[in-house]
């Protein structure tokens, strides 16, 4: 009986972490036949600890069932691999095209800044810059046409 009380006290202290609330646990009024297997749940009545009887209700667990539904057959492995190859090709192609757009726009802006810094700009110095702008606009329009850039993004780049 004393061993059982010590075991229950140890369980309460270790599992619930409440040694400050239950310093003494008396099981003198209870007999061994009154004990059921211990199970921890929210249904524990704390008032019964003062009378010397530990009353805990068992926890019933519902078995979980998983249902797998397939609405459509899975894709074939080779078609997924082909899609991955195509996506990689498009990614590299689009990256190169966007890089070209950025480079051309950077060159145009650099030339315009150099022209602004000159105190006296001649009309014949503007012609090469206009040619760079036309080439940049052409590259942007092609990127929009192919689908690398959205139409609004292309228009924004031209401004």
Image (cartoon, grey):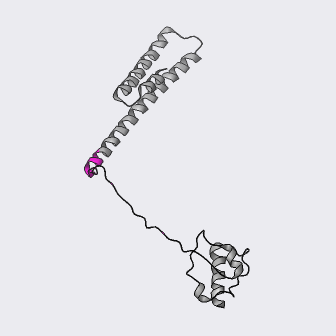
Q: Is residue 133 above or below residue 33?
A: above
Left/right of residue 78 with respect to residue 7 in the rendered view: left
Q: Which residues are magenta?
A: 53-82
Q: Residue at x 56, y 76 (%)?
A: 39
Q: Position of residue 54 (x, y in %)?
A: 64, 80
Instruction: Give the main secondary structure, helix, strand or loop, of the magenta stretch.
Output: loop
Task: Determine the image quadrant of residue 45.
Answer: bottom right
Q: Position of residue 75 (x, y in %)?
A: 28, 49
Q: Is residue 68 above or below residue 118?
A: below
Q: Is residue 141 above or below residue 74?
A: above
Q: Position of residue 27 (x, y in %)?
A: 68, 85
Residue 1 within the magenta-colored segment of the rendering: no
Left/right of residue 159 with respect to residue 82 in the rendered view: right
In this rendered view, identify the residue nearer to me: 117 or 27.
27
Residue 55 within the magenta-colored segment of the rendering: yes
Q: Is residue 101 visible?
A: yes
Q: Where's the N terminus, which quadrant?
A: bottom right
Q: Is residue 17 visible?
A: no
Task: Determine the image quadrant of residue 44.
Answer: bottom right
Q: Is residue 43 above or below residue 138?
A: below
In this rendered view, identify the residue nearer to me: 4 or 112.
4
Total residue callouts: 0
Q: Position of residue 129 (x, y in %)?
A: 46, 17
Q: Residue at x 35, y 25 (%)?
A: 145
Q: Residue at x 58, y 15 (%)?
A: 118
């Amino acid at each position: 009986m004393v061993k059982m009380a010590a075991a229950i006290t140890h369980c309460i202290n270790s599992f619930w972490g409440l040694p400050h609330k239950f310093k003494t646990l008396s099981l003198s009024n209870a007999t061994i036949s009154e004990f059921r297997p211990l199970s921890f749940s929210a249904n524990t009545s704390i008032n019964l600890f003062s009378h010397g009887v530990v009353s805990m209700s068992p926890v019933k667990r519902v078995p979980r069932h998983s249902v797998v539904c397939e609405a459509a057959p899975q894709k074939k492995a080779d078609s997924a691999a082909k899609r991955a190859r195509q996506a990689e090709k498009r990614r590299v192609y689009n990256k190169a095209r966007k890089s070209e757009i950025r480079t051309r726009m950077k060159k145009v802006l650099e030339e315009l800044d150099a022209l602004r810094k000159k105190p006296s700009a001649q009309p014949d110095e503007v012609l090469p810059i206009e040619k760079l702008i036309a080439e940049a606009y052409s590259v942007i329009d092609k990127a929009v046409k192919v689908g690398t850039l959205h139409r609004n993004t292309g228009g924004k780049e031209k401004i």
